[in-house]
Amino acid sequence: MKIKIADLEFEPLISEKVIVERTKAIGQQLNADYQNSIPVFVGVLNGSFLFIADLIKEIDRPCEIAFTKLASYYGGTTSKLKIRDDIDLIMDIKDRDVVIIEDIVDTGNTLHYLIDKLKKRNPASIAVCSLLLKPEALLSPIEELKYVGFEIENEFVVGYGLDYQEMGRNLRDIYKKI
Ligand code: XMP
Ligand code: MG
C-alpha cells in the first residue's frame, strides 16, 4: 500500500516479517562471533533505535549498550558531506570490542567519521552492523562493515527507525520513495 509523508509518496520495500527474520540471523552470528567477549553495542541515533532494540534481544550473552548521535541527512533525501556530531559516546571503550549499529550506510561518510573517531580511543576491535546498505552509493570501502541486513538500490527509504523530515520512524515496514 502506498503511503504519503509530507510531500513524498512511498511504497513497501521490506516487510516487518522479513526484518525480524534477518535480525534473528544477525543476532546468532554476533552470538557466535563474540562468545569470548563482552561487546559494547554502539547505536547511532536516531535511525538505528528500533534495529538496536530488536537486535539486542537476540544476544544471549553479556553485552553492553551505548549511544552516539550523528546526522548527515538533516531533513532532506540526500546525504550531506558534512557530518553533524550531536552527542558523543560517553562510555570508555579502551580495550573493548565495539560493534557499531547503524540503520543504513549510504555514502559511508558517517561511518568513516565515526570509526576514525572511535579508533583514537584504542578499542580492542571495531566492527559495524548495518541494517541496510546502498552499495552503489558507497564512496569507499569500509573494512569494518561485517554485518549487513539488506543491500538495497540507491533509493531513499523510510520506516523502522528511518525518517523523512523526522516522520515515518514509527512504521513497522521499510518503504522506498516512488
Ligand atoms: P552516509 O551517506 O554518511 O549516510 O553513509 C548515512 C546516514 O544517512 C542517513 N540516511 C538515510 N536516512 N533514508 C533515511 O531516512 C535513507 O534512505 C538514508 N540514507 C542515508 C542515515 O541517518 C544514515 O545513518
Ligand atoms: Mg543513521
Image (tube, grey):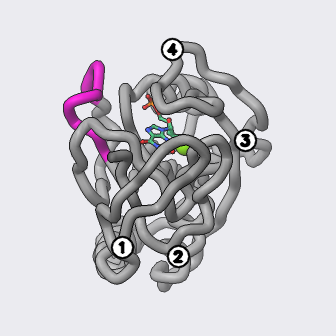
Q: Are marks 2 and 1 in contact (CB under 8 Å)?
A: yes
* Disc 4/disc 1 C-alpha distance (Å): 29 Å
Q: Closer to the N terminus: mark 3 or mark 4?
A: 4
**Please, what secondary structure does the residue beneath circle 4 have?**
loop
Residue at mark 1: 19
Q: Position of residue 133 (x, y in %)?
A: 31, 45
Majority SS type along the magenta span: loop
* Residue at horizontal 64 percent and vertical 53 percent from the top: 167
Q: Are marks 4 and 2 in contact (CB under 8 Å)?
A: no
Residue at mark 2: 54
* Disc 4/disc 2 C-alpha distance (Å): 30 Å
* Residue at horizontal 54 percent and vertical 68 percent from the top: 171
Residue 56 versus residue 136: which sits nearer the camera?
Answer: 136
* Disc 2/disc 3 C-alpha distance (Å): 21 Å
- Amino acid type, residue under disc 2 in the picture: Asp
Q: Position of residue 111 (x, y in %)?
A: 47, 32
Q: Closer to the N terminus: mark 2 or mark 3?
A: 2
- Amino acid type, residue under disc 3 in the picture: Leu
* Disc 3/disc 4 C-alpha distance (Å): 21 Å
**Depth-wise, is mark 4 or mark 2 nearer the camera?**
4
Give residue 61's mark: none
Residue at mark 3: 89
Q: What residue span does the magenta drawing correspond to?
A: 133-141
**Depth-wise, is mark 2 or mark 3 nearer the camera?**
2
